[in-house]
Amino acid sequence: MKEEFLHYLWKYGLYDADSLFDDEGNRIIVLHPGEYNRDSGPDFFNARISIDGTEWAGNVEIHSSSSHFDLHGHQTDPAFNNVILHVVAENDKRVFNSRGEELLTVEMVFNHQLFEKYLFLVNNPMVIACQDEIHRVDRFLIKHWLNTLVIERLQEKSALVLKILAETSNDWEETFFRMLTRYFGFRVNSGPFEMLASALPFRIIRKHSNSRFQVEALLFGTAGMLDEGLFKEALSDEYYRGLVREYKILSAKYTLKHIHGWLWKFSRLRPANFPTVRISQLAAMLASPDGFFSKALETDAAERLRQLFEVTASDYWNDHYVFGKKSINVPKCTGSQAADILLINAVVPVIFVYGMKRDRNDIRERAVSLLEEIASETNLIIQDWAAAGIESDSALYSQALIQLRNGYCRKRRCLDCRIGNLLISSGRSLKDQSELILEP
């Protein structure tokens, strides 16, 4: 039996409270189960129990078998000397702490239907284990859980923003540039785009932001796309040769080192998503004399913010997808869907972290409210949730459902999920109805 399931039973009191007695037959009354601990040390801190009128305060350790106390090396660890109660599913051995004192060990008695329900969920072959039962859970509780999960997802994304911020010595414009550029690759080319942003400091782009052609030269050149062997058909192309000449001047001026052009992926991509087109669109976005991050920070409506990212590649790309090869004439615009991807994955997380670093709850709340104004994503994960009866009506809920699927369902963390908690304990009364989750 997994210990995490016993932790769940203990925290929520889903066991027979009348079955706990010490070695002398005195009833053990649990006054407080303690604070759940996921780090090293006892499983629950600061628990309180009463035995024969005497109140004890200390820690609680939980194992599937009492012999696991020794198996895990706790008998020599002073951190377990303040354990006042050892709770087990099977009491197969007397155990002692590092002071040689025997631990008060009790077997937890519980309804095994709870364990069967837990096993049914964690062993279910469907990715969403509760797909056939989630309709039993109140929709208000699901929405409340999803609101918590979207903050959790933003906090996870904050780790990348904070990492880049530290690498750039707290330069918000540079950090914003790197986040935007990373997601401009739309997964397939996110790696090369990230390398491009690291190789080309935004302060250099900012010096030439009044010239779109120079920004394009900087981006294409640093991306390695102006190497002679990459686009042989473009050697006689005037636009291409102009970029090469401009980049030679700029790279010498700023001592720029380009990345390898062969890193970019073109296969299995729609031509409109070729990295050549994307780089020109990125140049259009960055060729702005005003502070780009400042614009994003000051714009409070998603629709107006989206307009900053709905850009068109330069005229050359109207009838090209790669250098030197003509195609049918079609303007290459990013469109609202691509703009929304940038808003969800780059803009909102950076604004959220900015509010966090400035201790401005209003800015953090605005970042979350922006997700409510953006249309829901329509990927396979969202389609699976729709099949299970959970619809997403905005990016706020699609992001929360992605977090739920990847962070909980795939890892079978049903005991850490409020929906899983409710389904496993259905028909049982919990000690704490307001907090249906095993929190760290």
Image (cartoon, rainbow, N blue to C red):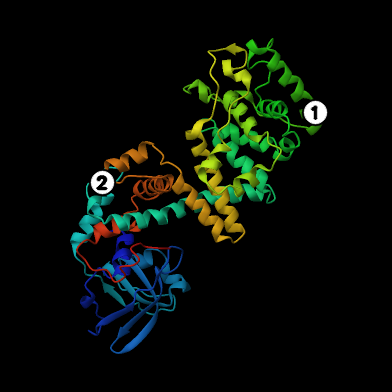
Query: What's under tag 1, amino acid-wise?
Result: Ala
- Which one is in front, 397 or 408? 397
* Residue that label 2 marks: 131
In this rendering, the answer to whether 180 lies above or below 314 is below
Residue at 59% of width from left, 42% of height from top? 179
Residue at 60% of width from left, 19% of height from top? 317
Query: What's under tag 2, amino acid-wise?
Result: Gln
Tell me which corner region of the image, top left, top right, bottom left or bottom right, holds residue 356. Answer: bottom right
Left or right, 149 with respect to 124, comes to right
- Secondary structure under tag 1 reads helix
* Residue that label 1 marks: 252
Other residues around mark 2 within 10 Å, as few (<14) / some (14–19) / many (≥20): some
Residue at 57% of width from left, 53% of height from top? 353
| Quadrant in the picture for the C terminus | bottom left
Residue at 33% of width from left, 60% of height from top? 4
- Which one is in front, 326 or 17? 326
Could one spot residue 121 in this view of the protein?
Answer: yes
**Which percent across, then down, holds residue 144?**
36, 57
Tell me which corner region of the image, top left, top right, bottom left or bottom right, holds residue 423. Answer: bottom left
Left or right, 258 with respect to 112, comes to right
- Secondary structure under tag 2 reads loop
Other residues around mark 1 within 10 Å, as few (<14) / some (14–19) / many (≥20): few
In this rendering, the answer to whether 149 lies above or below 383 is below
